[in-house]
Amino acid sequence: MSEKFINIGNKNFTNVDKIKHIIAADADKARRFLKKHNLDRASMQVIDVTGDKEVRSMILLDDNSITLSCVSSTALSKRARTYMETEDNEE
């Protein structure tokens, strides 16, 4: 099985197989979520790939880390679905 990566914004990529959830978010929702889980952007579990742009989605990975992205959750889910369908067709 080959690893498949999707672009999550600003020339950053993540492994599709590691994604648990993609959550639609804005800056306030991300801030509340991080505060609820006693985290902040400087935490080792939080990866901010927004490049000082607006937070549009949060990606929760299977290692319990959280990635903040400037790409919408709809676009990310379409990208992930495309890779998953490609993998199914290869089998």
Image (spheres, rainbow, N blue to C red):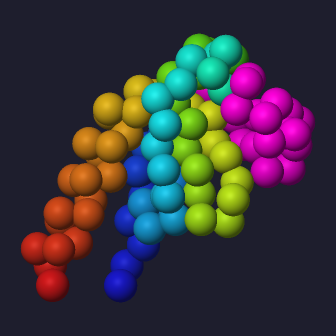
- Magenta span contains residue 40: yes
Residue at x 59% of width, y 57% of height? 61
Q: Nearer the viewer, residue 71 or 37?
A: 37
**Is 82 left, or right, of 10 in this rendering?**
left
Is 58 situated above or below 63? above
Q: How many marks?
A: 0
**Outermost residue toward the left in this view:** 89
Q: Quadrant of residue 55?
A: top right
Residue 63 visible, this angle? yes
Q: Is residue 76 left or right of residue 27?
A: left
- Of 54 and 35, which appears nearest the observer? 35
Residue at (17% x, 74% y) in the render: 88
Does residue 61 sit above or below 55 in this rendering? Answer: below
Q: Position of residue 89 (x, y in %)?
A: 11, 74
Quarter of the rendering occupied by the N terminus? bottom left
Magenta residues span 31-51
Residue 67 versus residue 85 in the image, above or below: above
Residue 36 sits in quarter: top right
Q: Residue at x 25, y 53 (%)?
A: 81
Which residue is at the front of the view, 29 or 11?
Answer: 29
- Please state if 27 lies on the left or on the right of 41 as rendered: left
**Farthest-out residue, front:** 36
User: Would residue 10 be seen by someone viewing this image from the given angle?
Assistant: no
Residue 18, horizontal then vertical, whole percent: 52, 65
The spot of residue 56 in percent (x, y) is 51, 23
| Quadrant showing the C terminus | bottom left
Closest to the observer, 87 or 29:
29
